[in-house]
Each structure stands twice: as structure tokens, then as C-alpha cells.
């Protein structure tokens, strides 16, 4: 069977599950939010990466149902977390451009009782390549309800900087490729390898936007990012994506 056909039954067959990865404040090490990441263990194809099946879900339209499942189950899991911890959910361009998206987010928040102010949606730039006006409107409406919008994978893709001005973001997330190209020692002569990441952090600061760096694996990277003024960090150094059960032990729950 083709992947798409199997994916269609993945929810019903209970093959999807969620894992959670903390995002910490770099200065204090305190967990400020948790990103939920989707996993698919297919009876037929084994473990399939979201890098493979998310594009298939987008092309086939399955992304709406799957995206709703992620949001609903993520919010359910997060309702009894420590109330200082937010939930960060990846949303694909196709999803946010669907006319029912805003209502479906609001309905899920209402049904689960999870507060809008603790929900962050991670969007990539591809949203703005398609129907920018529709995305803009949906983002504005969700922000009015208190949902925060994060620009994910910043610096990759087409990177027209103009959308930083036209779209109201609450935070930007620097792609892990920039973190992994940081070098421990300055390059001999010329610009150091952290020129780009430093420029991205400065840009965010000038726009008054907090910045998260993802893919931090080494303590010296965290140290360098702290020094450059980066606010938040995510990566294997702090925690790998973990089950709901393990995550709860990491962050604590409401009394
Ligand atoms: O978790 P992992 O590093 O394997 O994720 C690979 C890619 O899949 C990342 O770009 C991530 O944003 C994306 N991804 C993971 N979970 C979700 C999800 O629930 N929805 C969407 N749209 N993308 C996801
Ligand atoms: O595109 P997005 O930012 O959503 O991608 C998140 C993906 O990055 C997740 O699939 C997660 O498994 C992966 N990831 C998280 N931390 C690290 C890390 O420190 N190193 C690497 N290589 N991948 C990471
Ligand atoms: Na993300
Ligand atoms: Mn990313």
C-alpha cells in the first residue's frame, strides 16, 4: 500500500503519537514552553519521519484531520502542566490557509479548557508564499484571542525580510542549521562563523522579538548563544523529545 493510503488510517489504527521537547530560558534553564512533535509508527511501513509524511498529508488534504488531532491531544496533555509552561504546536501552511482553521483552534481550546495565552503556533515562511492576506487575517484573529505566533525555521527558505514587518509575530526561532554551523574557535581572518546568527539575533532584538535557537547540542553553543543575547534554547543538550510521562517529570505539574 502507498504511504498515503496507510496514513489515511493512521489515526483510527492508533498509529500516531506525540512526543514533547522542552524549550528553556537560556539564562535560568527554566522550561518556558514545550514543542509537541508528531510521530507515526505504521504497521505497514514502520517508523516514518514527519519530514516524509507531513508533505504527503499536505498534498492529500489529510493534514487538516491530522493537524486537528495534534492540537487536540497536545492541548489535552498540557492542561495539567505547570501553568508557566506553554505548548508549542507546528502548523503547516496548508492548515492555516484552510477557512475553518481559526474556528477549529478556538473550539479545541474551549473543549479542553487549555488557555489561549499558553498556546503558541509555529509557522514557517512557506505560509507567506501562498496567500499572504488570508494568513495575515487568520494570524491577527488568533492573536486577538491571545494565541502567540512563532516564526519557525527562520533564515531558511526564501527569507524575504518584508514579512517580519507585515506579520505580527511574537517570537522567532532560528533554524538549527545556523546553530550547528557555529564554531567553537573563531575562523582565522575574515568573518567568524557566527556572523549570520548574530545578525539574526540583533534583528530580532531591534524588532523587540524574543528569539529561540533550536538544535543546541553542546554546552559551548548554549554559552555562545547566551553571550549573543539569544533568549531561549531547545535541543538535545537540554532534552530530547520525550513521552508525555517523561515530560511531566521534567517540568512538574500544577499542585
Ligand atoms: O520531530 P522531527 O525533527 O523529526 O520533525 C521533522 C519535521 O516535521 C520538522 O520540520 C517539524 O516541524 C515537522 N513536524 C513535526 N511534528 C509536526 C506536526 O505536528 N505538524 C506539522 N505540520 N509538522 C510537524
Ligand atoms: O522544523 P522544526 O523546528 O519543527 O524541527 C524540530 C525537529 O528538530 C524535531 O524533529 C526534533 O526531533 C529535532 N531536534 C530537536 N533538537 C535537536 C537537536 O539538538 N539536534 C538535532 N539534530 N535535531 C533536533
Ligand atoms: Na517547529
Ligand atoms: Mn525549526
Image (cartoon, helix red, strand yellow):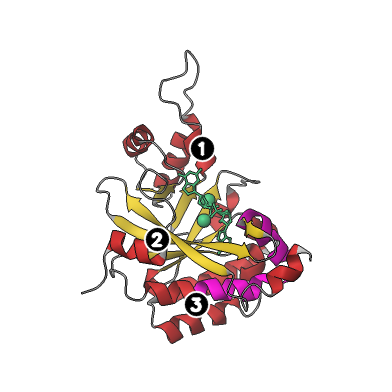
Which residue in the structure is indicated by mark 2?
34
- Quarter of the picture holding the C terminus: bottom left
Residue 140 in view:
yes
Which residue in the structure is indicated by mark 3?
72
Give the residues drawn in magenta, as a range.
50-71
- In the image, is residue 42 part of the stretch drawn in magenta? no
Callout 3: few (<14), some (14-19), or many (20+) C-alpha neighbours within 10 Å?
Answer: many
Q: Closest to the observer: 174 or 60? A: 60
User: Which residue is painted at 61% across and 67% down in the image?
Assistant: 135
Which residue in the structure is indicated by mark 1?
178
Q: Earlier in the sequence, mark 3 or mark 1?
A: 3
- Could you tell me how far apart the alpha carbons at marks 2 and 3 are, in whole angstroms? 15 Å
- Could you tell me how far apart the alpha carbons at marks 3 and 1 are, in whole angstroms? 32 Å
Hey, which residue is sitting farthest front in the picture?
A: 43
Q: Are marks 3 and 1 in contact (CB under 8 Å)?
A: no
* 3 or 1: mark nearer the eye: 3
Tag 2 secondary structure: strand
Q: Closest to the observer: 198 or 92? A: 92
Please state the total of marks drawn on the protein image.
Answer: 3
Residue 42, image quadrant? bottom right
Residue 97 in view:
no
- Quarter of the picture holding the N terminus: bottom right
Amino acid at each position: 500500500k502507498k504511504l498515503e493510503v496507510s496514513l489515511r488510517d493512521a489515526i483510527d489504527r492508533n498509529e500516531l503519537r506525540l512526543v514533547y521537547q522542552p524549550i528553556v530560558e537560556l539564562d535560568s534553564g527554566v522550561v518556558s514552553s514545550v514543542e509537541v512533535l508528531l510521530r507515526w509508527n505504521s504497521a505497514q511501513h514502520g517508523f516514518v519521519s514527519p519530514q516524509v509524511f507531513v508533505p504527503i498529508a499536505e498534498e492529500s488534504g489529510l493534514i487538516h484531520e491530522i493537524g486537528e488531532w495534534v492540537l487536540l491531544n497536545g492541548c489535552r496533555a498540557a492542561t495539567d502542566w505547570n501553568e508557566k509552561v506553554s505548548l508549542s504546536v507546528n502548523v503547516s501552511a496548508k492548515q492555516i490557509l484552510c477557512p475553518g482553521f481559526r474556528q477549529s483552534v478556538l473550539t479545541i481550546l474551549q473543549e479542553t479548557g487549555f488557555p489561549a495565552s499558553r498556546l503558541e503556533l509555529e509557522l514557517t515562511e512557506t505560509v507567506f508564499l501562498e496567500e499572504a492576506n488570508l494568513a495575515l487575517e487568520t494570524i491577527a484573529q488568533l492573536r486577538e484571542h491571545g494565541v502567540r505566533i512563532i516564526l519557525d525555521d527562520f533564515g531558511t527558505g526564501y527569507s524575504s525580510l518584508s514579512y517580519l514587518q507585515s506579520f505580527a509575530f511574537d517570537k522567532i526561532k532560528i533554524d538549527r542549521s545556523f546553530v550547528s554551523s557555529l564554531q567553537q574557535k573563531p575562523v582565522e581572518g575574515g568573518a567568524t562563523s557566527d556572523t549570520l546568527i548574530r545578525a539574526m539575533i540583533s534583528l530580532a532584538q531591534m524588532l523587540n522579538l524574543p528569539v529561540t535557537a533550536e538544535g543546541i547540542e553542546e554546552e559551548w553553543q548554549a554559552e555562545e548563544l547566551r553571550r549573543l543575547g539569544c533568549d531561549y534554547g531547545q535541543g538535545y543538550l537540554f532534552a530530547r523529545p520525550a513521552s508525555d510521562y517523561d515530560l511531566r517529570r521534567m517540568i512538574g505539574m500544577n499542585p
